Image (cartoon, rainbow, N blue to C red):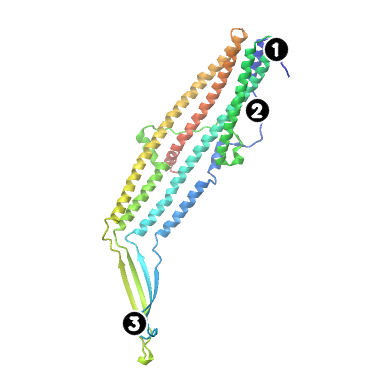
Amino acid sequence: MHLVFHSKKQLLALIIGFNLIGASNMALAAPILTLQAAETMALEDEPEIISQQWQMESLSAQSIADGQLNDPKMQVALANMPTDTFDFDQENMTQLKVGIIQQFPSGDTLSIKQAKTQKQSELFLSKIADRKLSIIKEVRLTYFEIYYWEEAKKTIVQNQRFFSQLVEIVQSMFSVGRNNQQDLIRAQLELSRLDDRIVKITQKINMQRSKLSRWVRDQNSTHALSSQLPELSIPEISDEFETLSQLFYSHPKIQEIDKQIDISREDIALAKEAFKPGWALNVGYAYRDNKPKEFGGGSRSDFVSAGVTFDLPMFTANRQDKKLLSKEHKLQALKDKRVSMLRQLVASLQQQQAVEEQLQNRHQLYINLLMPQAKQQTQASLLAYQSDRGDFADVMRAYIDDLNVKLDERRIAVDHLQSKAKILYFTSSFEQNNTGT
């Protein structure tokens, strides 16, 4: 269909009509993927979490085994058998010996080993908690990113329809001598730029959808997102270093290091037990046969024996002493690592708090000033063009600026939510600690 417009008033009416009417959205029967549903899917059957749970169960079972004595050893021996006749009853000292040997480790080694392995098992609770927080953060960041690019695509597609019609309008006016060729070329150029932007945005949407499929699986990653941007609430907390450091004691990353410190202390306790002697108990029974008939017969007494074996930890300078020193150095390294991690977490949270506050201020600036001003600029440029006090380039520039301001506002709104998602990675453990969960 070829439209012919003979005045700028007709062009103005059509432009205003496009802005008032907009593009209508068809109701889709496709399922909706909400943020909450995406988070739930991401945590269900997550392979790494399941793997860590199995490792925790494995160490929990191992801790029971570590607290038990080693199995006793049984000794069976034939002693003092004469080699001239190999008769069992020839000599008085020929015996069949059966003995039991039970070893006992030094000091409280068993209970300390059991406690250490149990703490290694509990270490995975912190790893799992941190993994869950990380997954939730990644799902939120990806979900919000998809939301932005799809909203950007919708906005540009709406403007693309307008620019497509505008090209046809300018071409019609040019054909009847009511406009110049420069206006037509400018309109066509801007339409081509919108086509290019849509191609790039579609590529970004596909990339983010593929990233989301890692958490919600392929069949769910293609579902439409909620039409409304989800809200996230962050707690009001101090930005002082000391206060935040106290709060971070409950964060899984600090809890994980605390468990490692506890394990290291058990290693030190084990190293100290090595200075104590271990020992073994040996109990035996020796059977002797009766005397030969040619020597008058008669029975021989059997023998019972018992013995204790001790370790003698006398030369400890290059073994026990060095091993203990090594464990103590490792403990100090973990303590320093804890301090470093606390500083890193506090600094990261403070940085995100500053970013969140800045984005909130910028979003209010766009809502209250920049978006109304961009709208006023488009209207003013149209009025000036209608009254022959402006040119078509000003109209195009005004509408492009209005489009970019709308996209910037959506970008800032999404960045603001993403900054909240990053803050919640740090502060979720604060809330759990305060509520006792």
- State the residue position of label 3: 93
- How far apart are the two marked residues, 2 and 1, measured between alpha carbons? 34 Å
Does residue 24 show up? Answer: yes
Instruction: Give coordinates of residue 77: x percent, y percent.
Output: 39, 76
Disc 3 residue crowd, few under 14, some 14–19, many 20+, Cα 10 Å = some
Query: If the image is split into quadrants, where does the C terminus sit?
Result: top left
- Of badges 2 and 1, the one in the foreground is 1
Q: Amino acid at mark 3?
A: Met
User: Relative to the observer, which residue lies in front, 405 or 169?
Assistant: 169
The residue lying furthest to the right in this view is 1
The answer to whether residue 20 of the structure is visible from this angle is no
Q: Give residue 351's quadrant in the image.
A: top left
Q: In the rendered image of this protein, does residue 253 appear above or below residue 66? A: above
Number of residues whose C-alpha sits closer than 10 Å to that of mark 2, classed few (under 14), some (14–19) or many (20 or more): few
Return the residue at label 2. 25
Q: Tag 1, which secondary structure?
A: helix
What residue is drawn where x is 39% and y is 38%? 247
User: Who comes first in sequence, dot 2 or dot 3?
Assistant: 2
Q: Classify 298 as above or below 282.
A: below
Mark positioned earlier in the residue sequence (2 or 1): 2
